Image (cartoon, grey):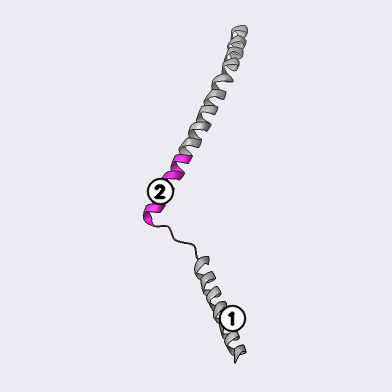
Amino acid sequence: MTTIVLVGGASALAVFAILVKARAGKPKKAQKKEKAEIVKRLLALSERENIVKGTSRQQSLSQSPAPRRRAAAGRSALTL
């Protein structure tokens, strides 16, 4: 009699654990408001990256072409 109760209790616990695991495993779908917030954050991050990349490119462009222009201007003056 005791064995039947223990086996039944263990079975009930196993079923309960399986059900809890099955429910917890499914990811929650984002609602429209959450999706909009995520998109806004991603857009802001993208804009920040573009600004950082843009300033570093502008700095490198403003530093490197100046010597080239001077060298090109010097060559053209010599060839004329």
Separation of disc 1 and disc 2 at Cα? 45 Å
- On screen, residue 50 above or below 27: above
- The outermost residue toward the left is 33
Residue beneath the point at 62% across and 11% down: 75
Q: How many marks?
A: 2
The image quadrant that residue 63 belongs to is top right
Which percent across, then down, holds residue 29? 44, 60
Residue beneath the point at 46% across and 44% down: 42
Give residue 10's mark: 1
Which percent across, then down, holds residue 28? 46, 61
Question: Which image quarter is the N terminus in?
Answer: bottom right
Secondary structure of residue under mark 1: helix
Residue topped by disc 2:
37
Amino acid type, callout 1: Ala
Judge the density around disc 1: few (<14), some (14-19), many (≥20) Cα neighbours within 10 Å.
few
For marks 1 and 2 on the same chain, the one whose residue lies earlier in the sequence:
1
Secondary structure of residue under mark 2: helix
Amino acid type, callout 2: Glu
Region rendered in magenta? 26-45
6 and 14: which is toward the camera: 6
Please indicate whether residue 31 sits to the left or right of residue 58 in the image.
left
